[in-house]
Image (tube, helix red, strand yellow):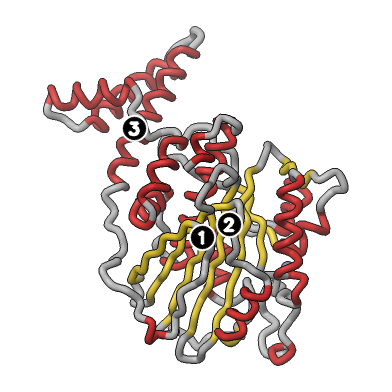
């Protein structure tokens, strides 16, 4: 875990990378679990389940995992009084709200304390959430299902889960053996229909907004270009000929997305991201020559978290279906499982029964 121990990267950069890894795992579980998206806290639990060593490194860099002085004080007070800390905090919040609303003087110190109280309250809410039960992972997706092991290079951990709807979910977390160069996260999400022998996918590349812009380093540029050449540039974003007339009610076929997240200021269960998903075909068109991506220019192409999940699961977004063998060939040809300097997440949803017939 050299990257996370390295002094060459600022605290901010480490936090951004750590958060993007959590965000990508959360996105994977959100797509798989449909209506029951996990929180970021849950996503961290899954990372712990899949790759305990990675988890240990990540939490070191994520804020909000440590108790504040105020949290410790309320815990002790609650114990002494035999009450719930949340109730005690809420009482004090009401008291301060009342004081602020009835005061004619400067209420800045009161407001500061009120905000600290609310943060403390969030801490206890977070703790409740962590009691969420993980999906069942006491089984292994057998190879008779035609699911081949993915030949990732690097340090790979894998886990199989059973989804609430009876489908299966396999998730790989991969990173280079020496990860001092780990600088980001990417997600490949795949859906498999084993009965028809077909698969489809979407690739997401995680970056962090810097205010209203995204500055692309040389490395970022190369990465996006590579993703573009591999997917958009390989006819993946063209309308498949056979389906040209069958379902025109969908987004363009672009299957690569830039997924910028917001800078984290204060975690304390508020690991929220803006949820932007922007098709790569558009990103590269909008990109200014000075390698800055402007949020307002991308806004008209950006799709929120919820819309992405629903549209992907209804086949309106992402690649079209292709024979599983072709997909394997496609990856092999493009060396998609070779070493990268990202933490890479490959999520495979194995669909056993369709609620509706899949649309193409
Ligand atoms: Zn594209």
Is 56 located above or below residue 242 in the figure? above
Is 303 located above or below residue 163 in the figure? above
Marks 2 and 3 sit apart, C-alpha to C-alpha, by: 33 Å
Q: Which residue is mark 1?
A: 345
Q: Is residue 350 left or right of residue 85?
A: right
Quick one: label 1 or label 3, which is nearer the N terminus? Answer: 3
> Residue at point 16% right, 30% down?
83
Q: Which residue is mark 2?
A: 186
* Coordinates of residue 53 in the picture (x, y in percent): 38, 47
Could you tell me if the residues under marks 2 and 3 are in contact, i.e. CB atoms within 8 Å?
Answer: no
Mark in front: 2 vs 3: 2
Most extreme residue toward the top is: 105
Q: Quadrant of ligand 1?
A: bottom right
Establish whether ligand 1 lies closer than 8 Å to the Cβ of label 3.
Answer: no
Q: Decide which of 100, 166 is in the foreground and name it.
A: 166
Marks 1 and 3 sit apart, C-alpha to C-alpha, by: 33 Å
How many labels sit on residues? 3
Q: Decide which of 238, 81 is in the foreground and name it.
A: 238
Q: Quadrant of residue 64?
A: top left
Residue 121: assigned label: 3
The local secondary structure at tag 1 comes to strand
Q: Decide which of 333, 233 is in the foreground and name it.
A: 333
The local secondary structure at tag 3 comes to helix
């Amino acid at each position: 875990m050299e990257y996370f121990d390295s002094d060459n990267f600022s605290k901010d950069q480490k936090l951004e990378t750590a958060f993007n890894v959590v965000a990508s795992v959360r996105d994977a579980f959100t797509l798989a679990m449909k209506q029951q998206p996990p929180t970021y806290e849950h996503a961290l639990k899954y990372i712990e389940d899949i790759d305990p060593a990675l988890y240990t490194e990540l939490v070191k860099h994520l804020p909000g995992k440590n108790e504040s002085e105020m949290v410790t004080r309320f815990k002790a007070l609650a114990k002494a009084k035999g009450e719930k800390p949340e109730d005690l905090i809420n009482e004090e919040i009401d008291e301060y709200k009342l004081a602020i609303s009835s005061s004619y003087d400067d209420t800045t110190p009161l407001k500061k304390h009120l905000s600290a109280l609310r943060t403390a309250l969030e801490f206890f809410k977070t703790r409740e959430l962590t009691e969420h039960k993980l999906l069942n992972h006491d089984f292994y997706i057998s190879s008779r299902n035609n699911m081949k092991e993915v030949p990732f290079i690097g340090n790979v951990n894998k886990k199989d889960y059973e989804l609430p709807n009876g489908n299966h979910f396999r998730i790989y977390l991969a990173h280079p053996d020496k990860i001092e160069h780990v600088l980001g996260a990417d997600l490949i999400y795949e859906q498999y229909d084993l009965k028809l022998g077909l698969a489809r996918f979407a690739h997401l590349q995680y970056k962090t907004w810097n205010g209203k812009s995204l500055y692309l380093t040389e490395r970022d540029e190369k990465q996006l270009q590579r993703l573009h050449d591999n997917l958009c540039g390989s006819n993946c974003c063209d309308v498949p000929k056979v389906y040209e007339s069958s379902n025109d009610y969908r987004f363009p076929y672009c299957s690569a997305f830039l997924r910028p997240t917001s800078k984290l200021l204060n975690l304390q269960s508020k690991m929220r991201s803006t949820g932007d998903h922007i098709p790569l075909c558009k990103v590269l068109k909008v990109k200014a020559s000075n390698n800055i991506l402007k949020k307002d220019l991308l806004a008209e192409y950006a799709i929120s978290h919820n819309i992405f999940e629903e549209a992907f699961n209804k086949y309106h977004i992402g690649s079209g279906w292709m024979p599983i063998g072709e997909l394997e060939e496609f990856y092999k040809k493009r060396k998609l499982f070779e070493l990268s300097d990202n933490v890479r997440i490959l999520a495979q949803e194995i669909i056993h029964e369709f609620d509706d017939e899949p649309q193409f």
